Image: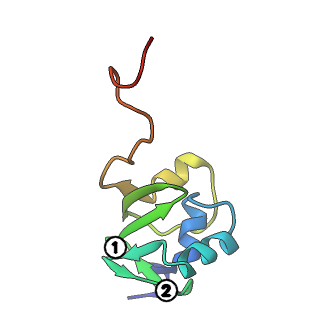
Amino acid sequence: MTASDEQRLDKWLWHARFVKSRSLAAKLIEEGCIRVNRQRVVKAATCIKCGDVLTASLFGDVRVIEIRGIGERRGPPEEAAALYCERLAPLSSTPADGEGGEA
């Protein structure tokens, strides 16, 4: 496997636009908010590759993401969206239609 087949987890989260900075990505990783292939990681330098599955608890949402590509830069949202595929729909904090108290 060559170096271009892998990337640091903090850098990938930043390239894929899940976080605004690599330092924020590193903080989330160190706090245990990210799992790679069901294994908890606490080092920002953890290498990931295409096909890995991330489980991320980010800002109140739990997301399961399959890595589809390795980014070379932090590009526009369309380019970032091509780097991953959502495995499950993100959980919504709003009630479903027909639920809730209407007067």
> Is residue 33 placed above or below 86 in the rendered structure?
below
The C terminus sits in image quarter: top left
In the image, residue 34 lies at what x, y percent? 46, 73
**Residue of label 2:** 46
Q: Nearer the viewer, residue 71 or 62?
A: 62
At horizontal 38% and vertical 77% (from top left) the residue drawn is 36
Residue at horizontal 37 percent and vertical 72 percent from the top: 50
Q: Give residue 53's quadrant in the image.
A: bottom left
In terms of sequence position, does the residue under pointer 1 or pointer 2 come before the other? 2
- State the residue in front, 34 or 3: 34
Q: Which residue is mark 1?
A: 52
Q: Label 2 is placed on what type of residue?
A: Thr
Instruction: Give above or below for 29 relative to 69.
Output: below
Q: Residues within 10 Å of mark 2 (few under 14, many from 20)?
A: some
Left/right placement of residue 21 relative to residue 90 reads right
At horizontal 41% and vertical 58% (from top left) the residue drawn is: 62
- Image x and y of residue 102, in percent: 43, 15
